[in-house]
Amino acid sequence: MLRATALALACLVGAPAIAAESPTYGKQLEGFAYPHPLKHFDFLSQGQNLQMGYMDVPAKGQANGRSVVLMHGKNFCAATWESTVDALSEAGYRVIAPDQVGFCTSSKPAAYQYSFQQLASNTHALLEQLGVKQAIILGHSTGGMLATRYALMYPQQVERLAMVNPIGLEDWKALGVPYRSVDQWYARELKLDAEGVREYERKTYYAGRWKPEYERWVQMLVGLNQGPGHEAVAWNSALIYDMIFTQPVVHEFKDLKMPTLLLIGDQDTTAIGSDIAPPEVKAKLGKYKELGPQVAKLIPHAELVTFEGMGHAPQIEEPRRFNRTLVEWLGR
């Protein structure tokens, strides 16, 4: 009994020390290891010299001549696609996974007019430099909104579109979620910490469950936010949240022309601004179990795959099942 008590006390004493030793990363995520070589695309945008970090992974298996572009979510980076990159490469695809401006290994400009059109244009410029004329576009979370915008802007260059728990399946603003100013978002982002991120991700991304391997992505996000680029990272995050809230894509799903796959974890409850929405509004938001089928009906050539009991990030929760489903669909 005495030994067990001593061990428990040691764990309690050790917990703050572990938290204090959490890594911090540079303004462009310097110090965080990506699963494949990181390259950089330098370009001019809005009168500024900017940079996008990206991975360009060739086919490991027999190359099929097709390319897949992966678009990450708001609290994610290109690195979080790790298992999907490997699965697609093994299946013969060239895989390009960029970090968008304002995120992860890319520039954090002091002033930038964020729009999904601008981010799509930046990505298109990267693909042009890489000689990619046509691609399969796969977007997760906020990346799903960007993938939709990209497909609407460049329909002839999008072979297929796939989205994993995309946010923006509903128009939160129109549903009654209050507006939050960029300054209010900025104040919130400055306070970001590991405990808060971990609890939010446990509830929303992983349907109340937690595995030790998820911690890597918590430390990636918090280490970036609390590093030397703390204020620049928080400011860009605030600008990006404003973009997400004020630029819905749900009204244009009907205009998508290409075959589209929706991969939905049905226990997801993600909804921007739900934390400040009135109770009667909050009760209606983020119901992916209902939103998945609704949106599949809006998109002309859509197929819906539901991962029952899973949350916002099925590609991280059950990567083997997710990757098998994706590769099978692409192979048809």
Image (cartoon, helix red, strand yellow):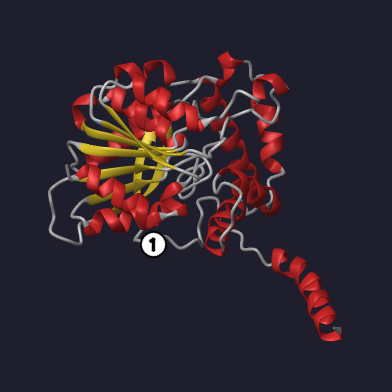
Q: Residue furthest front?
A: 308
Compared to residue 189, the image places residue 285 above or below, namely above
- Amino acid under label 1? Pro
Q: Circle 1 is placed at which residue position?
A: 35
Q: Residue at x 85, y 83 (%)?
A: 1
Q: Position of residue 142 (x, y in %)?
A: 47, 35
Quadrant placement of the C terminus: top left
Q: Residue furthest bottom?
A: 3
Judge by depth and name the residue closer to the eye, 241 or 274: 274
Left or right placement of residue 93 versus residue 31 in this view: left
Answer whether residue 57 is visible to the viewer in this image. Answer: no
Compared to residue 322, the image places residue 264 above or below, namely above
Q: Where is residue 265 in the image (x, y as percent from the top left)?
A: 46, 41
Q: Residue at x 69, y 48 (%)?
A: 196
Q: Which residue is drawn at 65% across and 25% down?
A: 283
Kindly state the secondary structure of the residue where label 1 is placed. loop
Q: Where is residue 286 in the image (x, y as percent from the top left)?
A: 56, 30
Q: Which residue lies furthest to the right in this view?
A: 2
Q: Which residue is drawn at 39% across and 62% down?
A: 35
